[in-house]
Image: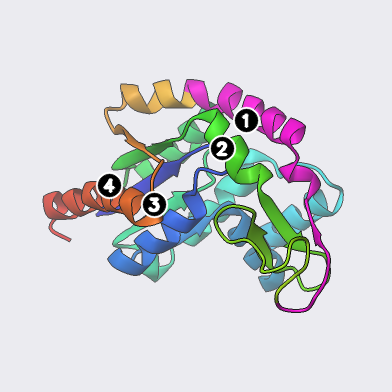
Amino acid sequence: MMNVMLLGAPGAGKGTQSKMLQEKFKIPQISTGDMLRAAKQARSKLGLEAEVYLNAGKLVPDEVVIGLIHERLAQPDAQKGFILDGFPRTVAQAEALDQLLAKDNKKIDAVISMDVPDEELVHRLAGRRTCSKCGTGYHLDFSPPRQEGICDKCGGELIQREDDREDTIRKRLEVYWKQTAPMIDFYKNHGVFKTISGTGSFEEVFGKIASIVAALGKVSGV
């Protein structure tokens, strides 16, 4: 069994790394954002309940998200393990997740925190640009357009999303650390918390994470 959680501030690369883990180890990446969208599309009872909150621009209550997580983890593809991305966000959610998993004799085997300095995160996020027409994404340093401010694909204007402005990024980081610091202590007390450096290439970071997950697989015989 390889039940893994990735932790990391906005811009740390959780989504990219969890998708790479899913491909290598053949266990599903479970993103709360993707899960909420799928539940809405499936028109399930919990999905419809979540939709009410989302349409009103409100946070979906913990009990609804936990219910959706329970439904998702019961599916056949999650029986040999899973990768949680974006959940839990608070100690209350972490405690609820523990109780949920315990009902099925499961637990979180490793919480892997991707440690990236805040200034690096600001640099990564503030450099993102999006085409106003087709939505193609760019980065001023890592994947710049051929012509400054112009989309390679459709010629549309490249814009900086409000979420990617420096003052907004710093507020997002402040909220993240305020919520996450107590959760780090929670998982350290469980003896499953591990930290890796999230700087370097995608491949370098993935190598560090994959070695931890592979070790879990050997212990559980997966």
The residue that label 1 is drawn on is 173
Would you say 28 lies left or right of 144 here?
A: left
Residue type for callout 2? Leu
Please give the residue where the numbered disc 3 appears in the rendered image.
201
Q: Earlier in the sequence, mark 1 or mark 4?
A: 1
The label on residue 121 is 2
Point out the frontmost of discs 4 and 2.
2
Residue matched to label 4: 208
Specify which label sits upstream in the sequence, 1 or 3.
Answer: 1
Determine the residue positioned at 58% across, 44% down: 124
Name the amino acid, label 1: Leu
Residue at position x 19%, y 55% from top? 217
Q: Nearer the observer, disc 2 or disc 1?
A: 2
The question of residue 22 being in magenta is answered with no
**Element at badge 3?**
loop
**Which of label 3 and label 4 is nearer to you?**
3
State the CA–CA distance, disc 2 to disc 1: 9 Å
Query: Does residue 3 appear in this view?
Result: no
